[in-house]
Image (cartoon, rainbow, N blue to C red):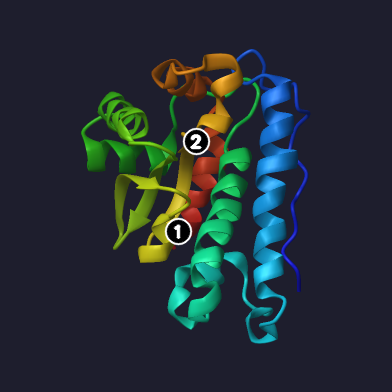
Amino acid sequence: MAHVLDPLPYACDALEPVLDARTLEIHHDKHHAAYVANLNKALEAHPALAHLSLAELISDLSRVPEGIRATVRNNGGGHFAHNLYWRTMKKGGGGEPTGDLAKAIASAFGSFGDFKAKLTQAAVGQFGSGWAWLFLEDGQLRIAATPGHDCPEMNGGTSMLVVDVWEHAYYLKYQNRRADYVEAWWSLVDWGRVAEGYRTAAR
């Protein structure tokens, strides 16, 4: 079964003024679409991998033939990361999480403020293109930045929140001001979706 580019869960202009419509249009319809197309092209000659979900595929790259492994890592990882990025943003997001997720964040990082500062630092400090993640590993919430399209899933983690710091995610509006983009991005976080991901991973 071929991997599919899902439509955005909102209109391209829904996240303005934080993310402009033109950026979302190019980001989703061009960049993300290219990752899906390249992934499917790489897998065409390997039907034995067709039954694997995207998460299964990238979580054990050793079963991917060496000749296409880098392509699957880059494009499969990009597809996975973008899916999570789109899904955990919404108009009128932001604020702070509640319930079990809020408790887990406080336990892992000291406070929500400390967590926000650490994830922001990971995102702003990532050299070159990449991502900053909140994920669960060995029952513990963790933060990490990854280069390219590497994901925590490639090392046994389960991701629940991510910020894209490839320049195409923000350059039309923010140019070189990555820190301004990341600070504005916090106002879009859909904590309800993040909490769903945490509940699923914690089980």
Q: Is residue 202 in view from this perspective?
A: no
Q: Residues within 10 Å of mark 1 (few under 14, many from 20)?
A: some
Q: Is residue 152 left or right of residue 90?
A: left
Q: What amino acid is found at the position of numbered circle 1 in the picture?
A: Ala
Q: Residue furthest bottom?
A: 48
The correct choice, above or below, for 119 with respect to 35 in the image is above
Where does label 2 land, which residue? 166
The x and y percentages for residue 90 are: 63, 29
Q: How many callouts does the rendering have?
A: 2
Q: Is residue 132 in view from this perspective?
A: yes
Q: Nearer the viewer, residue 157 or 34?
A: 34
For residue 201, the mark is 1
**Which SS class for mark 2?**
loop
For residue 73, the mark is none
Nearer the camera: disc 2 or disc 1:
2
Q: Is residue 92 left or right of residue 124?
A: right
The x and y percentages for residue 128 are: 39, 36
Q: Which residue occupies 66% across, 35% down?
A: 27
Q: What amino acid is found at the position of numbered circle 2 in the picture?
A: Trp
Q: Nearer the viewer, residue 130 or 53?
A: 130
Q: Which residue occupies 58% across, 58% down?
A: 75
The N terminus lies in quadrant: bottom right
Q: Which residue occupies 51% across, 17% down?
A: 175
Q: Residue furthest front?
A: 67
Q: Residues within 10 Å of mark 2 (few under 14, many from 20)?
A: some
**Which SS class for mark 1?**
helix
Q: CA distance from mark 2 to mark 1?
A: 26 Å
The correct choice, above or below, for 142 with respect to 27 in the image is below
When asked about the image quadrant of residue 112, the answer is top left
The x and y percentages for residue 12 are: 75, 27
Q: Which residue occupies 51% across, 42% down?
A: 194
